Image: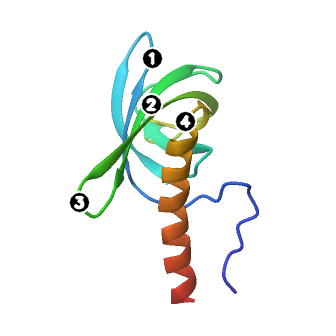
């Protein structure tokens, strides 16, 4: 039986280029999963929950990557065995048009996955 997403904004496992910025650093990484409400990714340094971030996310499209810029806050940090950190980010300042772009991207892959089942 296929997995049924119950979140307001469904999430998919996709690796997308992601740039995170704070007052103290910039880091380039990629998402582990993404939704219109937030992202989960792995980075090489500890970030405390409630750390505010500037975010640039790149969504692939037919002709070029669509850039989404927003603000986010770290809501969870987990240390991994390889001394990296997995962080959950909530998009707390995102334009409605950008939220829609992410939702369309996620929904495209959700529909594609449903066809396979």
Query: Which mark is in front, 1 or 4?
Result: 4
Q: Residue furthest right?
A: 6
Query: Which mark is in front, 1 or 3?
Result: 3
> In x, y percent, where is residue 28?
32, 34
- The disc, 2 or 4, on the residue closer to the chain's N-terminal end is 2
Q: Are marks 1 and 2 in contact (CB under 8 Å)?
A: no
Tell me the quadrant of the picture where the C terminus can be found.
Answer: bottom right
Residue underneath mark 1:
22
> In x, y percent, where is residue 51?
58, 19
Crowding at dot 1, Cα within 10 Å, few <14 / some 14-19 / many 20+, comes out as few
Q: Are marks 2 and 3 in contact (CB under 8 Å)?
A: no
Residue underneath mark 4:
95
Relative depth, front residue between 67 and 31:
67
The relative height of residue 84 versus residue 48 in the rendered view (above or below) is: below
Question: SS for tag 2?
Answer: strand
Q: Is residue 16 visible?
A: yes
CA separation in Å, label 2 and label 4: 12 Å
Q: Is residue 13 left or right of residue 67?
A: right
* Residue at 44% from the left image edge and 59% from the top image edge: 14
Question: SS for tag 1?
Answer: loop
Q: Is residue 63 left or right of residue 12?
A: left
- The disc, 1 or 3, on the residue closer to the chain's N-terminal end is 1
Crowding at dot 2, Cα within 10 Å, few <14 / some 14-19 / many 20+, comes out as many
CA separation in Å, label 1 and label 3: 30 Å
Residue underneath mark 2:
55
Colour treatment of the image: rainbow
- The disc, 3 or 4, on the residue closer to the chain's N-terminal end is 3
Q: Are marks 1 and 4 in contact (CB under 8 Å)?
A: no
To which quarter of the image does residue 15 belong? bottom left
């Amino acid at each position: 039986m296929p997995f049924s997403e119950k979140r307001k904004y469904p999430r998919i496992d996709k690796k997308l280029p992601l740039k995170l910025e704070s007052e103290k650093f910039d880091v380039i990484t990629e998402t582990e999963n993404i939704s219109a409400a937030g992202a989960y990714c792995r980075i090489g340094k500890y970030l405390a929950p409630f750390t505010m971030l500037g975010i640039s996310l790149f969504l692939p499209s037919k002709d070029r990557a669509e850039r989404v810029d927003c603000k986010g806050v770290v809501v969870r940090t987990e240390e991994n065995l390889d001394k990296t950190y997995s962080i959950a980010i909530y998009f707390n300042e995102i334009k409605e048009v950008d939220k829609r772009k992410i939702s369309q991207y996620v929904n495209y892959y959700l529909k594609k996955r449903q066809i396979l089942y």
